[in-house]
């Protein structure tokens, strides 16, 4: 475990949560960081990713417009702001990272492209 995810919890439908992913500086400074989730009995799925520079993001269609990823270089932290949460958002959320050069604008959605992973934080949305 090289990344530390936190912020999960229980929230009612329509509510909000903010997850945080902290990485060592040696990783954070060179990596794009993404979020994935895995619901009970389902495969892990891509949620979103932010580029190394923070200038580009990409989101799964299921969360677009509701979730926002940002990064704070001073704190080596990437945040996932989740609004308008629905019961189908219930899952363990993982942050992950992959090394990239600053000029590489490609954003990866496949988990197998990621090198660094966190331990996961549980988000439960009640109806």
Image (spheres, rainbow, N blue to C red):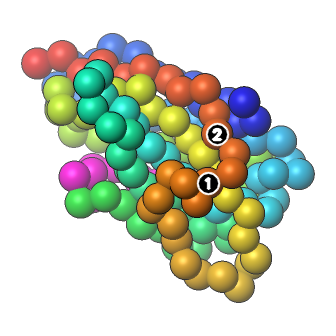
Query: Mark 2: few, some, or many residues within 10 Å (few <14, many ≥20)?
Result: many
* The N terminus lies in quadrant: top right
Q: Which residue is mark 2?
A: 117
- State whether residue 5 is above or below residue 31: above
Q: Kindly state the secondary structure of the residue where label 2 is placed.
A: strand
The residue positioned farthest toward the bottom in the image shown: 103
State the residue at coordinates (11%, 18%): 127
Question: Which quarter of the picture shows residue 23?
Answer: top right
Residue 26, position as x, y percentages in the image: 88, 51
Left/right placement of residue 26 relative to residue 17 reads right
Left/right placement of residue 91 relative to residue 23 reads left
Question: Which quarter of the picture shows residue 89?
Answer: top left
- State whether residue 36 is above or below residue 8: below
Q: Which residue is mark 1?
A: 114
- Does residue 29 appear anywhere in the picture? yes
**Contact (CB < 8 A) between labels 2 and 1?**
yes
The residue positioned farthest toward the right in the image shown: 26
Query: Mark 1: few, some, or many residues within 10 Å (few <14, many ≥20)?
Result: some
In-front residue for pair 13/108: 108
- State whether residue 80 is above or below residue 70: above
The residue positioned farthest toward the left in the image shown: 127
**How many discs appear?**
2
Say whether residue 67 is magenta. yes
Residue 77, position as x, y percentages in the image: 68, 44
User: On residue 20, which mark appears?
Assistant: none
State the residue at coordinates (27%, 32%): 42
State the residue at coordinates (39%, 51%): 46
Q: CA distance from mark 2 to mark 1?
A: 8 Å
Q: What is the span of residues highlighted in magenta in the rendered image? A: 62-70
């Amino acid at each position: 475990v090289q990344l530390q995810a936190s912020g999960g919890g229980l929230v009612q439908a329509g509510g909000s949560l903010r997850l945080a992913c902290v990485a060592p500086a040696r990783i954070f400074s060179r990596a794009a960081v993404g979020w994935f989730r895995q619901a009970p009995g389902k495969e892990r799925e891509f949620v979103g990713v932010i580029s190394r520079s923070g200038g580009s993001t990409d989101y799964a269609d299921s969360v677009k417009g509701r979730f926002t990823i940002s990064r704070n270089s001073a704190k080596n932290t990437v945040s996932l702001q989740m609004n308008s949460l629905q019961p189908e958002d219930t899952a363990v959320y993982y942050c992950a990272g992959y090394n990239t050069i600053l000029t590489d604008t490609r954003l990866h959605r496949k988990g197998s492209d990621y090198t660094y992973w966190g331990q996961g934080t549980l988000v439960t949305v009640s109806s």
